[in-house]
Amino acid sequence: MPLLGYIRNMFSLSVPLGKLVRRATRLRGGGSALPGLVVEKIDPGFMRRTLSTLPHGVAVVSGTNGKTTTTKMVVELLESQGLKVFTNRTGSNFTRGVAAALLGEVDWRGRLDADIAVLELDEAHAVHFVNSVPPRYCLLLNVLRDQLDRFGEIDKTAQLLQQIAAKTTGTVVLNREDPRVARIADTLTGQDVKYFGLDESLLGTFPNDDDMRAAPGSPAPAGLPEKPAADVVLRNVGADTAEFEYDGGTVTTAMKLRGVYNIFNAAAALTLARSICGGGAATANHETLLEALSQVAPAFGRGESLTVDGQPLDLVLVKNPSGFRLGLKSFPAGGYATMIAINDNYADGRDMSWLWDVEFDSLRAEGVDQLTGSRAYDMALRLQYDEVPFGSVQPEIAPALAAFIREASGKPKRIFCTYTAMLAIRRELSKITTVEVVS
């Protein structure tokens, strides 16, 4: 009994201790995941105990590209239906990031006032999470070559997503157009499976990993299975609108989100939100769903637009060939000064060979004004091969950003950046303009 009492006392102290660590790290200006790491060490059951009380359970969003913005969309769609939603809005998508976010929301006794948790999780860390906290819902977006030093080949990533789906107790939402994701349905037993998909006319805009590596004019592989019906289909993408089909009809809505990839992920978010709210018109208020979708702004660093010296400055996160290609397509260089910031820290992936799978021809006419980050010279070499002119090469981000802003004064600006470079750039920009604080 003394041992049990000691354990209970330790667990009762884990939340207050975690909150104190969180407060201390915020006063020092960083360390968003550190409090979660502390509470995980001293109280491994904290997340399971806290999240198991939610009436609608947990929804996990995972996949290679689009997790942060898609999670933000799902949260705002559900809130439009009157649900209280807990989420890890910093984009820290390891389990310790979820634990840290929980510490910011629970009371001192560890109680969470929410109806559902919608969590963005890194593919590998999601497996650890679902083994401890089986989700009621999961949304699996795509499988693309990313951080090969961590994940290896993409079939390994697909296996990680399959494990997430297998642990899901209710509804699994899959990308119909990604063959590695769609095939997960064949391995499931008992889960309700729903799909989001594309109109045939849009398939070339959103290539899966195999499509990106096929030679021009290659024939389609023989014997492809017939595609399943999708709950939500993206039919058309306009300059600031999107057309979706569901429940036998089509609807057009305005979109604040920028980037064609975000519009496809809106179909994914709609599918998950409809599943959680009950699906059909009898349970979900589709008018408010669409109104909420039309108002979703980009997640931080994902097409986020700031104002510097009276001109827009866009931050576009790029972390793999697919993301960089679609970023270049969604945010063309015409009329903008351009900077590229490439880091190779752990959160970015150490293997930068993926830069050679991106075509930079679209930057040739305007050129690139500034290259920065720990791999600035690698980026310079890559641009030389595509005959893209560039200006200064400065690995240190702070002086490079200052020079870019100074030399491109009076012009709108655009920065393509890897994850840790984006965080560093936002910190520098917060000294001279309004930058949303994400904590």
Image (cartoon, grey):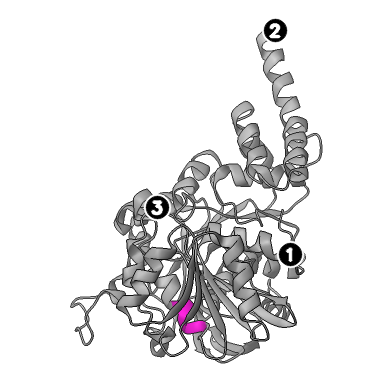
Question: Can you give x and y, in whole percent of width and height, for residue 343 in the image?
Answer: 47, 58
- The residue labelled by disc 3 is 350
The CA span between labels 3 and 2 is 48 Å
Q: Earlier in the sequence, mark 3 or mark 1?
A: 3
In the image, what residue type sits under mark 1? Glu
Q: Circle 1 sits in a helix, a strand or a loop, which is it?
A: loop
Near mark 2 (Cα within 10 A), the count class, few <14, some 14-19 or many ≥20, is: few
- The residue nearer to you, when weighing 244 against 202, is 202
In the image, what residue type sits under mark 3? Arg
Q: Circle 3 sits in a helix, a strand or a loop, which is it?
A: loop
Q: Is residue 145 left or right of residue 14?
A: left
- The residue nearer to you, when weighing 273 against 161, is 161
- Residue found at x 33% / y 60%: 186
Quadrant including the N terminus: top right
| Highlighted range, magenta | 326-330
Near mark 1 (Cα within 10 A), the count class, few <14, some 14-19 or many ≥20, is: few
- The residue labelled by disc 1 is 436
